[in-house]
């Protein structure tokens, strides 16, 4: 209401009077006496402030939903900074509507796909290394058992058992996997 009362004194009315005569007549017809109705001001406020604020809040909700997707188990191994950067980028791209930005979004999503593919490759290599380590550990354990069995055979029940050099060589070769067991 205050702005409506002050509106006839706005300097901008003078610019309208000096401009195009048709614009002046239209402005005078829409705003008699240079008075801007408070209902028009409320509508402007709704369009320029309230709706924008609501859109920003809705976008924040969408951003949190996207962040939750990134926090899901498929993406949990990505470093936190990468996830944050990705969610910021995607949030920014969600706001865009022109062709250039859509192309950027597609490009960014393709890059994300490449990143996820590389991450998957690293995970598979890590699993390969873990499997190899377990296999080697099992071989070492089997060798220890064979060495313990050989010691037991050599020592016998308190007396040393004599093995021929061929038998000893064969047993040592079995332990190291140099001959068929």
Image (spheres, helix red, strand yellow):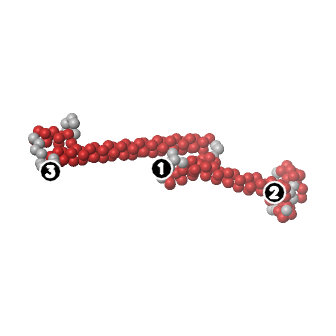
Q: Residues within 10 Å of mark 2 (few under 14, many from 20)?
A: some
Closer to the chain start, of discs 1 and 3, is: 1
In this rendering, the answer to whether 141 lies above or below 49 is above
CA separation in Å, label 2 and label 3? 107 Å
x%, y% of residue 148? 21, 47
x%, y% of residue 171? 17, 41
In this rendering, the answer to whether 72 lies above or below 14 is above
Q: Are marks 2 and 3 in contact (CB under 8 Å)?
A: no
Instruction: Identify the residue shown where x is 54% and y is 44%.
Output: 108
Q: Which residue is mark 3?
A: 158
Closer to the chain start, of discs 2 and 1, is: 2
CA separation in Å, label 2 and label 1? 51 Å
Name the residue nearer the viewer: 132 or 85: 132
Q: Quadrant of residue 164?
A: top left
Residue 147 shows in this picture: no
Provide the secondary structure element on which disc 1 rests.
loop
Provide the secondary structure element on which disc 2 rests.
helix
Left or right side of 5 for 128: left
Query: How many numbered tags mark residues here?
Result: 3
Provide the secondary structure element on which disc 3 rests.
loop
Closer to the chain start, of discs 2 and 3, is: 2
x%, y% of residue 161? 12, 45
Instruction: Identify the residue shown where x is 16% and y is 48%.
Output: 157
Instruction: Identify the residue shown where x is 81% and y is 57%.
Output: 41
Q: Which residue is mark 2?
A: 41
Quadrant into which the C terminus falls: top left
Q: Which residue is mark 1?
A: 77
Quadrant into which the N terminus falls: bottom right
In this rendering, the answer to whether 43 lies above or below 167 is below
Specify the label residue 131 is tagged with: none
């Amino acid at each position: 209401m205050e702005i409506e009362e002050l509106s006839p004194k706005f300097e901008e009315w003078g610019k309208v009077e000096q401009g195009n005569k048709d614009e002046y007549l239209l402005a005078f017809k829409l705003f008699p006496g240079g008075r801007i109705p408070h209902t028009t001001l409320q509508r402007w406020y709704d369009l320029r402030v309230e709706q924008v604020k609501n859109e920003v809040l809705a976008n924040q909700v969408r951003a949190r939903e996207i962040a939750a997707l990134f926090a899901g188990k498929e993406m949990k191994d990505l470093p936190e900074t990468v996830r944050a950067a990705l969610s910021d980028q995607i949030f920014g791209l969600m706001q865009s509507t022109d062709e250039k930005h859509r192309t950027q979004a597609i490009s960014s999503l393709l890059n994300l796909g490449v990143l996820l593919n590389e991450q998957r490759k690293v995970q598979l290599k890590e699993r390969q290394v873990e499997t190899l380590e377990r296999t080697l550990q099992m071989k070492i354990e089997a060798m220890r058992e064979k060495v313990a069995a050989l010691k037991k055979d050599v020592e016998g029940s308190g007396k040393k058992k004599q093995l021929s050099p061929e038998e000893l060589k064969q047993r040592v070769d079995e332990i190291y996997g140099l001959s068929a067991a």
